[in-house]
Image (cartoon, rainbow, N blue to C red):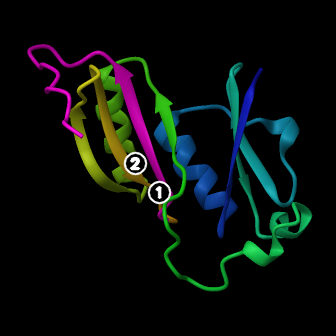
């Protein structure tokens, strides 16, 4: 199975450029259309749809009507090669106009992770298995 994950965007070229700068992935050129661009690896495709996709998908009644901030109901976690790659992605996101929601931190499950928002305020995480040298995982939070 191969995962294809899509964002519905106000500005497809800008969102495509942001994630390309953050992740350094190649374009899925065969998938390009006037209303779609995507980044691709052998394992997944990360796509960016323009507003007409709402109607094509039968979602016209769920399309945002203005500049309102939509709630976070889902987010992607992009697993990177190591803690240094997480730190580099955070810097690249800032440089490309993104926002740090939560700076890099050690998780209780032993990952180095940051929570970011893209220029359209979609939330995503960058994470890597393992922690920077000398860092320990915090204790499991209590329910």
**Residues in magenta, as a range:** 121-143
Q: For this view, does 97 lie left or right of residue 24?
A: left
User: Mark 2, mark 1: which one is toward the viewer?
Assistant: 1
**Looking at this rendering, what residue extends furthest in the left direction?**
134
Q: Quadrant of the C terminus?
A: top left
Q: Mark 2 points at which residue?
A: 93
Q: Give how far across and how far down residue 120 sits, in percent.
A: 52, 65
Q: Mark 1 points at which residue?
A: 118
Q: Is residue 126 above or below residue 129?
A: below
Q: Look at the image and say whether residue 122 sits in the magenta stretch.
A: yes
Q: For this view, does 66 lie left or right of residue 107?
A: right
Q: CB atoms at circles 2 and 1 under 8 Å apart? A: yes
Label 2: how many Cα within 10 Å (few below 14, some 14–19, many 20+): many
Near-viewer residue (74 or 5): 74
Label 2: which secondary element: helix
Label 1: how many Cα within 10 Å (few below 14, some 14–19, many 20+): some
Q: Is residue 114 above or below residue 127?
A: below
Q: Give how far across and how far down residue 88 sits, in percent.
A: 33, 33
Label 1: which secondary element: loop
Q: Distance between the residues labelled 2 and 1?
A: 7 Å
Q: Is residue 17 above or below residue 114?
A: below
Q: Give how far across and how far down residue 38 sits, in percent.
A: 72, 43
- For image coordinates 17% across by 22% down, the residue present is 137
Q: Give the quadrant of residue 90.
A: top left
Q: Give the quadrant of residue 52.
A: bottom right
- For image coordinates 49% across by 60% down, the residue present is 72
| Marked residue nearer the N-terminal end (2 or 1) | 2
Q: Give the quadrant of residue 60.
A: bottom right
Near-viewer residue (79 or 33): 79
Would you say the magenta stretch is mainly helix, strand or loop? loop
């Amino acid at each position: 199975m191969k995962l294809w994950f899509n964002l519905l965007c106000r500005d497809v070229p800008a969102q495509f450029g942001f994630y390309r700068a953050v992740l350094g992935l190649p374009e899925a050129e065969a998938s390009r259309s006037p209303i779609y661009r995507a980044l691709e690896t052998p394992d997944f495709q990360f796509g960016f749809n323009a507003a007409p996709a709402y109607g094509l998908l039968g979602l016209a009644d769920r399309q945002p009507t203005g500049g309102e901030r939509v709630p976070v109901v889902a987010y992607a976690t992009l697993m990177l090669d190591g803690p240094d790659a997480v730190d580099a992605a955070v810097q690249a996101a800032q440089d490309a106009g993104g926002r740090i929601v939560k700076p890099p931190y050690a998780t209780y499950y032993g990952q180095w992770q940051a929570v970011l928002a893209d220029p359209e305020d979609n939330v995503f995480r960058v994470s890597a298995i393992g922690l920077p040298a000398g860092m320990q995982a915090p204790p499991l939070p209590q329910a």
